[in-house]
Amino acid sequence: ASGGGTGTASGGTGAAGGGTGTATGGQGGSGGHLPADIVEPGDPGQGDVTFTVRVDQGVRPISPLIYGANWAEDLDGEQRGTSVVRMGGNRLTAYNWENNASNAGSDYMFQNDAHLVGNSPNGDVPGEAVRMLAEDALSHGAAFIATIPICGYVAADKAGDGDVNKTANYLQTRFHPTIARKGAPLSAAPDLGDNAVYQDEFVAWMKQAFPDAFQGEVASVLFSLDNEPDLWNHTHERIHPDPVTYAELVEKNIEFASAVKDVAPNALVTGFVSYGYSGYVSLQDAPDADGNFIEHYLDAMKAAEASAGRRLVDVLDLHWYTEIYANGERITGDDSSPESVEARVQAPRSLWDPTFKEDSWIANDVLNGPITLIPWLRGLIDAHYPGTEIGFTEYNYGGGNHISGAIAQADALGVFGREGVFVATIWDPGEEVSMLRAGVRAFTSYDGKGARFGDTSIHAETSDVAKATVYASIDEADPSRMVLVAINKTAAPLTAAVTLAAYASYTAVDVWQLTAAKADLVAAAAVTPGATNAFTYAMPAHSVSVLVPR
């Protein structure tokens, strides 16, 4: 596969470079100081699992950009609170911003057509396909990720006449080269007759179309360097029939990232936008493969910064679709058998858990152990290009209309926040996704009115990670405001014994619950602590609960 609302890209890069630590400055009310005293919890009583939350441990800012989605178009409804919208996927590799033509690649007959603008009366207006989605995102307070085609060619026409290879010399007649720099004055009205499409001119068009988005220290428009280059020779074999090489991809990333930064120096650039694990380690067995490709890429981008005198690529951008199979099917699909449900609700543990070995070829045949994806990536970054952020601009655990999909989605977002991921955009196919979207809203609009998980992660520990997980947050501006997301991964109710070491003494805990009964978070009866900042909470079977002490 190749694939929402407050939050901008403010804050820059480099913050997530070295594991956990303490959030510096800015916390607390007046003067930016934390309150002096922590209220220690009493005894909550017995539970099936215990949740231990401490406001003075594991403190780190949560990037606002982890609550994103690809192609989000329901920002006032099911996708309310989406913090970043990505316009990405296979279609963007050969997207021509000058006339909005694109090529479907292997997804649909390798056809050039007008798919990205549909029946829009402005379909021939330069950049219209991007403008429609970006305008909606930015007007809702979300950031936007645009894709820069770097593969080599973009579609020249919107003929919609099937495979372009039916045309003689199709590469010359049906496509135009995509070129990093125009080398001449940039125009919002590009020359349609020069048989070339310039990407620095596209960035300049973006700046002219959305000037407010490029104000401040960091722009709220990010630029992604194409999409899944490790699969170009399959997905886009008409324009790139040969496997991409280490040397080619590094050269293209440097060239196009530099062109972007020339025009929009405050815009963040993401690369190399790999499709999955084999791409990470060998660029899908690239002809010139020599060692781990992520290491090679980070080394090359570090050297490029030294040469250019500025950072070119800000985010290591990867896609993560779990390779776990259950009941004979990959769990990224819609199977809701007991086997798939159990595998799906456990799958996000591979993002971080050193005690969890999933049943996949990656864990069984390559690593012979746990994947621990984010810590592994963090180690590579620390060793090869410190300050680089981590992004997952496509991921999806399947079960979009099943409570297990909501559980996996909420669990992944909790992990992303706790582990310091910078940007994440779920691949939302737009159909059969009501539970998946509800799982996101546990963090972005749990009350249906925009109430969100906090902006700072704190220590939240479960006694049994296979049965239940918990994530906790406070707000930088008000550290006494605490929000917990509690997840029951089992098919039976569980009682959680919860303790909160906090900057306030709470007298009640408001509750919202997401269960199999309805793809929405529903307010439930508040819980009264049985002791100081200590209580038991009855989690429904297979559920996501939002707990807000007050």
Image (spheres, rainbow, N blue to C red):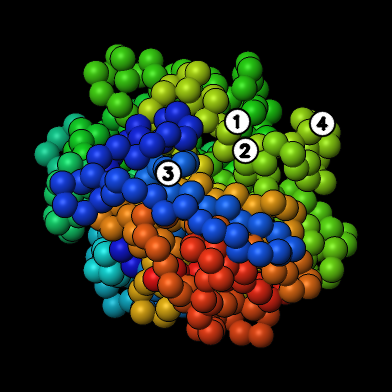
Looking at marks 3 and 4 on the same chain, the residue that comes earlier in the sequence is marked by 3
Q: Is residue 119 above or below residue 395?
A: below
- Residue 396: x and y in percent read 61, 58
Mark linked to residue 324: none
The residue that label 4 is drawn on is 368
Q: Are marks 2 and 1 in contact (CB under 8 Å)?
A: yes
At x 39%, y 50%, the residue is 38
Which type of secondary structure does the marked residue at label 4 adopt?
loop
Question: Badge 2, how many Cα within 10 Å: few under 14, some, many 20+?
Answer: some
User: In this view of the protein, which residue sits in the foreground, 312 or 438?
Assistant: 438
Residue 33, horizontal then vertical, whole percent: 23, 44
Q: Earlier in the sequence, mark 2 or mark 3?
A: 3
Q: Amino acid at mark 3?
A: Asp
Residue 441 in the image, given as x and y percentages of width and height: 48, 70
Viewer-nearest residue: 368 or 205: 368
Q: Could you tell me which residue is drawn at 50 percent across and 80 percent down?
A: 526
Tell me if label 1 and label 4 are in contact, CB under 8 Å.
Answer: no
Q: Nearer the viewer, mark 2 or mark 3?
A: 3
Real-space Cα distance between discs 2 and 3?
26 Å
Image quadrant where one finds the N terminus? bottom right
On the picture, is 353 further left or further right than 190? Answer: right
Q: Residues within 10 Å of mark 1 (few under 14, many from 20)?
A: few
Residue type, numbered disc 4 = Asn
Q: Which residue was labeled with disc 1?
A: 376
Residues under numbered marks 2 and 3 in contact, where contact means CB atoms less than 8 Å apart: no
* Mark identifier at residue 373: 2
Tag 3 residue: 56
Q: Secondary structure at mark 1?
A: helix
